[in-house]
Amino acid sequence: MVKLPNPPPWLQQLILSDSQLGLALLALLAGLASGIVITLFRLAIEWPLILFLPMTSAESFETLSPMLRTGMLICGGLALILLFSRRNEEGRSVGVTHVLIRMERHQGYLPSSNLLLQWLAAVIALLSGHSIGREGPAIHLGAGTASQIGQFTGLAHHRLRILAGAGVASAISASFNTPIAGVIFAMEVVLLEYSTRSFIPIMLASVAGAIVSRAIFGNTPAFDVPPLSMHSLLELPAVLILAFAAGGLAAAFIWTVRYLQRLNRLPLWARWGSLTLTTAAISWYLPDIMGTGYDTVNAALSGNVVAGVFVMVLLAKLLLASWAAAIRFPAGLIGPVLFIGAMLGALIGDAMSTTFSERGLETGFYVMLGMGAMMGAVLGAPLAALMALLELTANPNLIMPGMLAIVIATLVVSEGFRLPSVFEVQLGGNQLYQTPDPVLLMLRNTWVADAMTRAVATVERHLDAQLARQLLEGHTEWLLLEQEQILVPMAAVAEALSQLPAPDDALSEPVHSIDLLSIPGSRAAIQRIPLKANLQDALDQMQARDIQWLGVYRRPSTSKRGPGNCLGLVSRDMIERFYRYQPRNARP
C-alpha cells in the first residue's frame, strides 16, 4: 500500500475525518480516474481489431476467415494460461467476485497487482475473440482504481469501501453511458446497502465516468435502440411469457455455472484450454458468439431476426459464458447475460409480431425487456436492471412492462428454482455475498474516532507529582505508559496523591514523582490501532489479541516515523455503549 510521505495538515484533516466534502472530492477524482482507465481499456480492445484486421467494427468477427478466428482464439487462450499459470490462487483473483471478496474481507483494499492483471488479461481475452463481456473487468478496474486512490491518501476504512463503490459506479457509467444504473449497481450488488452518506460520492463518481466516456465516445448508449413502446395492454400476455422464459433461462445459466464448477478440480491449462478449443470449434460455424456480440444485439433491436441462427447462438452463448464464469476465466459475464436476454426477446418478439402482424408489434421492444429481465434475474439486481433499461432506451414507456418482466424473472429464479445470484454461486455459496446484519453494518460504517475517548495523557512510568495534580484537575481519566503498553486509571493516581504528604508539611520529605507501576490499582494491557480504522477493525483486533483496550494513533505502529502520540482510547464497553445509545437516525 502506498501512502503520501508527508501529507499536509489540511489534507490529513480532510481525509481522516467524517467530512462529506472530503469524500465527495475524492469520489470525483476517483470517478474521473476510473473513467479514464475504462476508456483506455475500451480503446485497447477496439483500435487493434480495427487497425490491424479486416474488420469494420470491433464486433464484426464474422468478417474474418474461420482459420484466422481459430488462430486468434488459440493464441489468446495460450497467452492467458501462460500469464496466470505461475500465480497462486489469490494472485489470480480478478473480476466482480474479486471485488466482492475484497470489499467484505479487506475493507475495500484492492491490490494493484490484481488490477494490472485484470486489465491485461481482459484485453487479451477480448482481442482474441473469446465469448465474454467487458463489463465485469470494467467493474474490477473501476473499483481498483478508486481503491488505489483511497490507499494512496490513507483514507479511513469506513470510507474506503464507499470510494471503491464509487469506482464501480463510474465504471458502469462509462461502459454503458448509464450513470443512474451505475449508482444503483454499486449500492445494490457491491456495497449491499443503501445509505445517505454513500449516495453523494457515488453519484459524483458516476457522473464523472459518464463525462469522460461521452468526451471520447460521444453521447451514445451501448446499443442502437430505436423508439419502442407497448402499443396496448393486449401485449401483456407476451410480456408475461417473456418474463417466465427469462426466469427459466436465467436459472439454467446459474445452474450451469454451478454444475461446471466441478471442472475447477482440473489444472488451469486443462480448464481454460478446453474452453478455448470449444469456443474455436463453435465459432467455426457460429462466429456471432465471438466477443461481446453487441452487433448481433443491435441487429435484433432493428428487427433483423434469423430465428434458427438466434436459437443456436443463444444456446452456444449460454454454454460458453456459464463455462467461463464457472472456471474463473478472466472476463465478465454481464455482457453475455445481456446478449442471451436479447436473443430470447428477439425470438419471442419475432414470433409475436409474425403471429399478430396486424398489431404492428416491435421486436426491439421485447429485445430490451429480455435484456433487463435476464440481467435482473441472473445478477440478483432488479433495480439496477430497471435503471439500465430506462437509460439505454431513454423511454419511460418501458418502465411498467420492464418492471413486470424483471420482477417476475427474478422471482422465478429466487423463489421458483431457489437459486441465488450468479455471483454468490461463483463465490461458492459460503455466505460471503450476503447482506450483513445491522450490527455488523454499523460497526463497519463507523469511524473509530466516533466512539473513542480523548481523556488520556501519555506519560512516563515515573510521573511528576505536580504534573499528576495538573492532569487530575484537567479531567484526564487515563494515563498511558506507551513504552510498557500499559493503561493506568487516573483514579489510582488520585488515590496515590491523597496518600502523599501535603506540600506545606515541613516535617515530611517531599515526594517529587510517582511510580505508576508500583501504586495500587488495576491496569490494562493496550495495543495500537490506526485512526483510519473502523469499529469492526477495533473489535477484530481486540478479539484476536484478547484485550479490552486500544490506543488510537494517526499512523500505524509499523510506520517508519513511529505511531506518534496517542489520540484517544477505545474499549469494548465504549463500542457497546456507542451502538446501544446512539440515536436511531444518527447512522444510515
Image: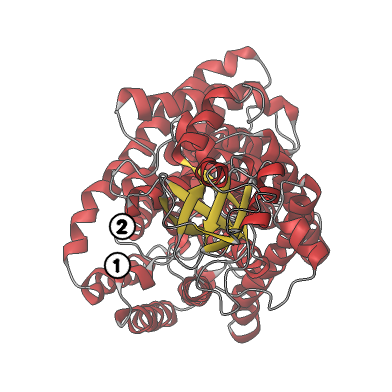
- Amino acid tagged 2: Trp
Instruction: Assess disc 2: are there few (<14), some (14-19) or many (≥20) residues with their C-alpha within 10 Å of its C-alpha.
Output: many
- The span from disc 2 to disc 1 (Cα, nearest Å) is 7 Å
Across and down, in percent, residue 515 comes to 49, 60
In the rendered view, does 19 fall on the left or right side of 276? right
Which one is nearer the viewer's eye here, 52 or 420?
420
Q: Is residue 209 visible?
A: no
- Amino acid tagged 1: Leu
In the rendered view, does 167 fall on the left or right side of 10? left
Q: Residue at x 30, y 75 (%)?
A: 88
For disc 2, the marked residue is 323
Residue 54: name its quadrant. Answer: bottom right
Q: Residue at x 56, y 80 (%)?
A: 560
* Quadrant into which the N terminus falls: bottom right
Across and down, in percent, residue 72 comes to 43, 81
* Quadrant into which the C terminus falls: top right
Residue 75: name its quadrant. Answer: bottom left
Residue 121 drawn above or below residue 487: below
**Precedes in sequence: disc 2 or disc 1:** 1
Instruction: Assess disc 1: are there few (<14), some (14-19) or many (≥20) residues with their C-alpha within 10 Å of its C-alpha.
Output: many
In the rendered view, does 5 fall on the left or right side of 425? right
Residue 404 drawn above or below residue 305: above
For disc 1, the marked residue is 275
In the rendered view, does 564 fall on the left or right side of 397? left
Residue 201 drawn above or below residue 91: above
Which one is nearer the viewer's eye here, 342 or 304?
342
Across and down, in percent, residue 263 comes to 19, 60
